[in-house]
Amino acid sequence: MENQPGSTEIATEQKEIRDAIADMDTDALLADGWDEYILGTAYSPGRPLLVIYDGDGIIEKLAKEMTYEEAEDYFSFNIEGAWHGSSTPVFVRKIRI
């Protein structure tokens, strides 16, 4: 894969984000391959740290390889709907009315 302009900086930033999350909670789960869509983390007393992702951004990226409807279906079933216990990441979607 050919390096894109700024790709080294992006990879470094994504590693730093992953490391920062691991420093906060080593049990926090990340969605593999979607680091660029991490928005932050959420914490609530008595619950594990959750990693928050931009679900709309992930769908937009998927839609470059398939129709938007297929991307939504794939995201819903394979990414957002994948349950890995109480530390499963959260995917934020904007409400459209």
Image (cartoon, rainbow, N blue to C red):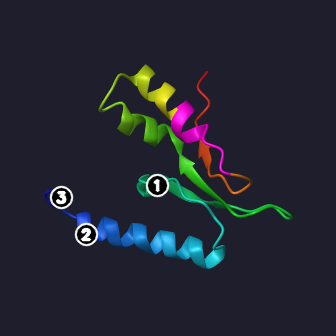
What x and y, as percent, mark residue 37?
Answer: 46, 52
Whether the residues at callouts 3 and 2 have beta carbons within 8 Å, the answer is: no
Q: How many marks?
A: 3
User: For residue 66, which quarter of the picture?
Assistant: top left
User: For residue 24, which quarter of the picture?
Assistant: bottom right
What x and y, as percent, mark residue 16?
Answer: 44, 74
Q: Which residues are magenta?
A: 76-84
Of pointers 3 and 1, the one earlier in the residue sequence: 3
Question: What residue is disc 1 on?
Answer: 32
Q: Is residue 44 found left or right of 16 in the rendered image?
A: right
The three-letter amino acid code for the residue at tag 3 is: Gln
Q: Is residue 92 found left or right of 7 in the rendered image?
A: right
Q: CA distance from mark 3 to mark 2?
A: 8 Å
Q: Is residue 75 found left or right of 50 in the rendered image?
A: left
- Tag 1 secondary structure: loop
Q: Is residue 69 magenta?
A: no
Farthest-out residue, front:
84
The three-letter amino acid code for the residue at tag 1 is: Asp
User: For residue 61, which quarter of the picture?
Assistant: top left
Question: What residue is disc 2 on?
Answer: 8
Residue sitting at x 16%, y 61%: 3
Question: What residue is disc 3 on?
Answer: 4
Question: Given this view, does label 3 or label 1 mark the residue nearer the observer?
Answer: 1
Whether the residues at callouts 3 and 1 have beta carbons within 8 Å, the answer is: no
Q: Is residue 81 magenta?
A: yes
What x and y, as percent, mark residue 59?
Answer: 44, 35
What x and y, as percent, mark residue 89?
Answer: 62, 52
